Amino acid sequence: YVVPLEAVKGDLREFLLVPYFGACIHVPPPPTNQVVYVSYPKGAPVDDLWDAIWVKGKMRTVSSSHEMATASYSMDAVEVSVYEE
């Protein structure tokens, strides 16, 4: 699930990838090893924050701290899409 950090014209450019809806917003953030900071300069048109998403890219063990949570991992995404069951 997504926790938005930066959006340009409705497209997410930076966000936190978290394991459940509402993480960091309505409840305390998950442990840092369950949070991934994602950079996606192309911008992802995520309409509903309660939708699960797929993110493809190279993940690294680089921690970063943000107002919403601290992430133990970061990813430069090459593709972001809504998860379809």
Image (cartoon, helix red, strand yellow):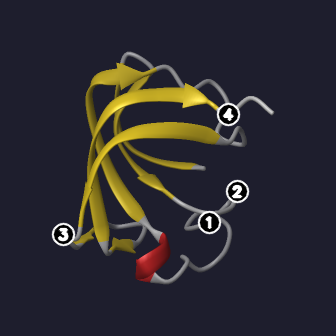
* Residue occupied by mark 4: 83
Would residue 67 appear left or right of 28 to someone viewing this image?
left
Inspect the image, locate mark 2, and give the three-letter code of the amino acid beneath it. Phe
From mark 3 to mark 4, how far is it between C-alphas?
A: 25 Å
Q: Nearer the viewer, residue 62 or 3?
A: 62
Residue 41: image x %, image y %? 22, 27
Location of mark 2 (residue) = 21
| Labels 3 and 4 touching (C-beta < 8 A) | no
Give whichever of discs 3 and 4 has the lower sequence position.
3
Q: Mark 2 and 3 residues: CB-CB less than 8 Å, in contact?
A: no
Q: Dot 1 surroundings within 10 Å: few (below 14), some, or many (20 or more)? A: many
For the residues marked 3 and 1, what is the alpha-carbon distance in whole angstroms? 20 Å
- Give the residue number, with chain letter if any, for mark 1: 23
Q: Nearer the viewer, residue 68 or 46?
A: 46
- Type of the residue with mark 4: Tyr
Q: What kind of residue is marked 1?
A: Ala
Circle 4: element type: loop
Mark 1, secondary structure of its residue: loop
Nearer to us: label 2 or label 4: 4
Say which mark, if any, is on residue 62.
3
